[in-house]
Amino acid sequence: MSQCKQIEELIIKRSIASLTDKDEEMIENHLLSCAACTAFASKIENITVCENDMVVSPQRNIKRRLMKKMHKRVKQQKTSIVNRIVDIFTFQPAIYKVAAAAILLFLLVLSIPQLDQPQNISNSEYRTAMVDTVSLNVINLNQIIQIVDSQKVGVNLSEDTVLTKILYTL
Amino acid sequence: MNIFRQTYKTKTDEELMRAIQSGETRAFDVLYDRYSRRLVNYFFQRLGQDQDLAQDMLQNLFLKIIEKPHLFNAEKKFSSWIYAVASNMCKNEYRRRDIRKIVQPLSDSGAEDVIKKVDKPDDHFDNKEFTTAVYDKLNQLDEAKQNTFLLRFQQHLSIKEISEALDCSEGTVKSRLFYTIRALAEALPEFNPNMR
């Protein structure tokens, strides 16, 4: 292979990836004395440096349309959170169902409005109401009611532990 | 609003994509601005310089990102993934419209990559004409070489990114680029704008 052919190949390779120092030096030395290879190197540089090639700009209405779609998808995603909760009960293993049920029950107990005024209602009324609704152990329910009524949830560790145990057994 | 946008601007493509997956619209805004111009020009060159088609393809590509963001594999580089999708869209479009008949590329083998030489005399080539001639000649090459050349020199992807996008080895990418550049160099006249 003539030296010019070899240099031409190296010039092309150089435009794709970096060469070794030895090859770089070889090219530079050759270019000093070879006009044809210098022209070739210049041509390769112009082929690979396409400066004027970004000729098209994206239309503005495309972005507007896409952003609308994106907002719509996000909305749908938010509504599907409810579906996900339903999925937990439908598709997940039993342990998740039990945990989710316990959390929901805990929230339910906390949100019963009567619990705000315990002095007006007797324990037996609570008992009947709760047993009718969820058929739970009466003693445990009374314990929950007492703890929640005394507003000591999160204050007394031992009582919180009792509450956790009760919820766990549920 | 701008402060939020600024925060997203510093995120990587992959982080933005994860944010899009969890429904953050601003992340999409930033990612679109980052890639839309490059991609529309990529489609423009790949699809016979049809501007309307390029715009449609750009819209369809980003629609895919909106509707099926979970298709992005977080282990892969986003740039490789998006160009892989774009490249496949072009292939489907070729099939659909039989665009190959219009551009009439030559055969796949390197030996047959002899492009018809440009008729214009050397002296009358300016910079813009030269670039146009490069793309005209490029369109006569087979699709794989065209694609590899555009991804490297128009879209400025690394060899590794191209190999991931086109699902081939880095050696194949380098070899395609070598034969493409050589074929273009042989077909184009001597040109040195610095000497004019």
Image (cartoon, helix red, strand yellow):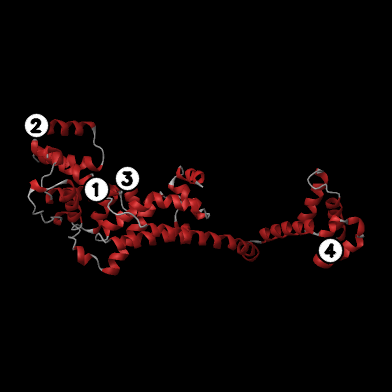
Q: Quadrant of the C terminus of chain B?
A: top left
The residue identified by callout 4 is: A130
Labels 3 & 4 near each other (Cβ < 8 A): no
The residue identified by callout 1 is: A52
Circle 3: residue type:
Ser
The residue identified by callout 2 is: A33
Q: Nearer the viewer, mark 2 or mark 1?
A: 1
Q: Nearer the viewer, mark 1 or mark 4?
A: 1
The residue identified by callout 3 is: B158
Q: Which secondary structure lies at badge 1?
A: loop
Q: CA distance from mark 4 to mark 2?
A: 100 Å
Residue B142 position, x and y percent, is: 21, 58
Q: CA distance from mark 1 to mark 4?
A: 77 Å
Left or right: B51 with respect to B29?
Answer: left
Residue A77 position, x and y percent, is: 55, 60
Circle 2: residue type:
Ser
Q: CA distance from mark 3 to mark 1?
A: 20 Å
Compare residues A115 and B87 and report the one nearer the observer.
A115
